[in-house]
Image (tube, rainbow, N blue to C red):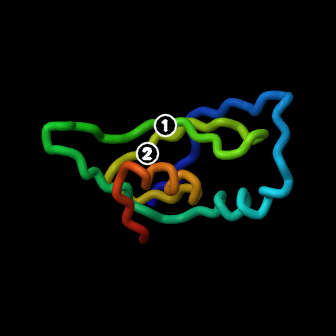
């Protein structure tokens, strides 16, 4: 199992403050989950991974993630939530 981390991170703007009323949701969304991101694309599309930027809360750094297909990985739950909108996920 591969433990993934963001490949890039951009700090939040100085004028953005994290709203503490979201702290419990934020902490829960950071919990690691083990999954396989399944490639369910047409066979003529040869894509080995996806890259995307993610920032769910103001005041939190923006992160760029590189997600491989068909490999067991451990990532924060918020990454799975974002990717599951467009790709099939298998929990381990």
> Taking 20 as reference, is 6 left or right?
left
Furthest residue to the bottom? 92
Single out the mark in the foreground, 1 or 2: 1
Which residue position is annotated with label 2?
A: 67
Eyeballing the image, is 80 above or below 15? below
Q: Residues within 10 Å of mark 1 (few under 14, many from 20)?
A: few
Do the numbered discs 1 and 2 sit on residues whose CB atoms are within 8 Å? yes
Eyeballing the image, is 59 above or below 37? above
Q: Position of residue 53 (x, y in %)?
A: 54, 36
Secondary structure of residue under mark 2: strand
Q: Residue at x 45, y 50 (%)?
A: 83
Q: Residue at x 37, y 55 (%)?
A: 37
Image quadrant occupied by the C terminus: bottom left
Q: Residue at x 73, y 60 (%)?
A: 27
Q: Position of residue 32 (x, y in %)?
A: 59, 62
Image quadrant occupied by the N terminus: bottom left
- Tell me which numbered mark, 1 or 2, is placed earlier along the sequence: 1
Q: Quadrant of residue 44?
A: top left
Secondary structure of residue under mark 1: strand
In this rendered view, identify the residue nearer to me: 91 or 73.
91
Residue 52 - label: 1
Q: Residue at x 82, y 34 (%)?
A: 16
> Taking 80 as reference, is 63 left or right?
right
Residue 84 - label: none
Q: Position of residue 43 (x, y in %)?
A: 14, 44
What whole-number distance in Å separates the C-alpha atoms at marks 1 and 2?
9 Å
> Taking 2 as reference, is 21 left or right?
right
Q: Position of residue 73 (x, y in %)?
A: 45, 57
Q: Residues within 10 Å of mark 2 (few under 14, many from 20)?
A: many
């Amino acid at each position: 199992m591969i433990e993934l981390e963001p490949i890039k991170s951009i700090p939040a703007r100085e004028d953005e403050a994290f709203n503490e009323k979201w702290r419990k949701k934020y902490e829960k969304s950071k919990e690691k989950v083990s999954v396989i991101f399944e490639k369910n694309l047409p066979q003529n599309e040869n894509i080995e991974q996806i890259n995307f930027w993610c920032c769910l809360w103001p005041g939190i750094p923006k992160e760029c993630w590189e997600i491989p297909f068909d490999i067991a990985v451990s990532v924060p739950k918020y990454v799975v939530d974002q990717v599951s909108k467009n790709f099939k996920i298998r929990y381990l």
